[in-house]
Image (tube, helix red, strand yellow):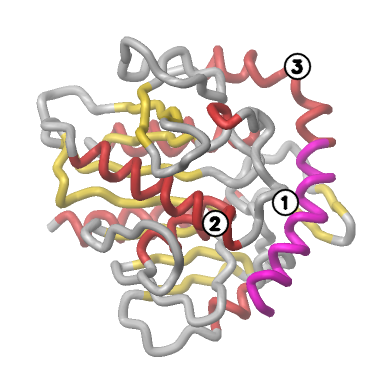
Amino acid sequence: MHLNAIAACLMATAQQSLKSHILLTATAVFTVAAVNAIPSVEAASAPPIGGGYANAIAIPVNDPAVKEIAGALFKPEGTGPFPAVVYMSGCNGLNFPPEIRQEKRVIDNNLSKGIATLIVDPFTARGEKDGACDKLDVPGFTRGGNDAVAAVKLLKSMPDINPAKIFLQGYSYGAIASLYATDTNTPGDHDTAIAGLITYYPYCYDNVSPSVPTLVLIGEKDDWTPAAACQAVKGNVNFDLVVYPGATHGFTEPFEQPFDVDGHHLAHDEAATKDAEQRVEAFIDSHLK
């Protein structure tokens, strides 16, 4: 399946499902964020950020429409320099309760291992508080890749972050954007000097060729970004694929219950999520040595 075809499928279904799901749970967003909030690094001024984060930092971006997007940076105690993960969410954005809970889980896990996390919000500063599921096309992924590169560049400029130990970690839209950021065959900006790339349920577009060590984690039953497209990738030494039997698209998202949208099934799979977390931990550890 070509990129434009999968983009059309994602666009048609994601807009309806995520919009309705957000409307049903919107009243819980800031309650969840308040309960789960972790103080982030303060900045004097920054663009608006979603997810209920109290503070934000500015990420300068390569975009004629906007000069900066926002991020929330969480650092371990101590002086560093710390390894770091740049977190790129799905197209539904940060104001989605399962996304908020997933981010907290990643932040907590990383902090416990002495790793900083930069949560990137590509959407709110652009007036897309409910995400950008209408931009699942080459220009949208190019923009996302540029944002990921900009976030890495910002981290590399910080004295308490180890510039040689920065990872990209993306989910769905964020995973494809992260692939764009490291695949020099795609349009837009690239950074091939990062420690590694972690992608959850990406679309493996034609001739995908990440130029850094890449871990792909995807569900066997994913009918939005099919595992078969990733299984078709052959001969790339940077490409390590794990397919989870029975798991769907978004299997790491802590949905309260499974649901179907236009024939697509989404469900949280805790067993697959925990296994994926262990593999991510091992992947990061192996590239920190």
Q: Position of residue 126 (x, y in %)?
A: 57, 31
The residue range painted magenta reads: 1-19
What quarter of the picture does the N terminus occupy? bottom right
* x, y percent for residue 113: 26, 39
The answer to whether residue 8 is magenta is: yes
Q: Residue tagged by mark 1? A: 267
Residue 176 vertical position relative to residue 226 in the rendered view, above or below: above
Q: Is 129 placed above or below 220 here?
A: above
Q: Nearer the viewer, mark 2 or mark 1?
A: 2
The nearer-to-camera label among 2 and 3 is 2
* Magenta stretch, overall SS: helix
For the C terminus, the image quarter is bottom left
Q: Which residue is mark 2?
A: 141
The amino acid beneath tag 2 is Phe
Q: Earlier in the sequence, mark 3 or mark 1?
A: 3
Tell me the tag on residue 129: none
Say if mark 2 contacts mark 1, CB within 8 Å: no
Residue located 34% across and 36% down the image: 117
Q: Position of residue 132 (x, y in %)?
A: 66, 42
Q: What label sits on residue 27 in the rendered view?
A: 3
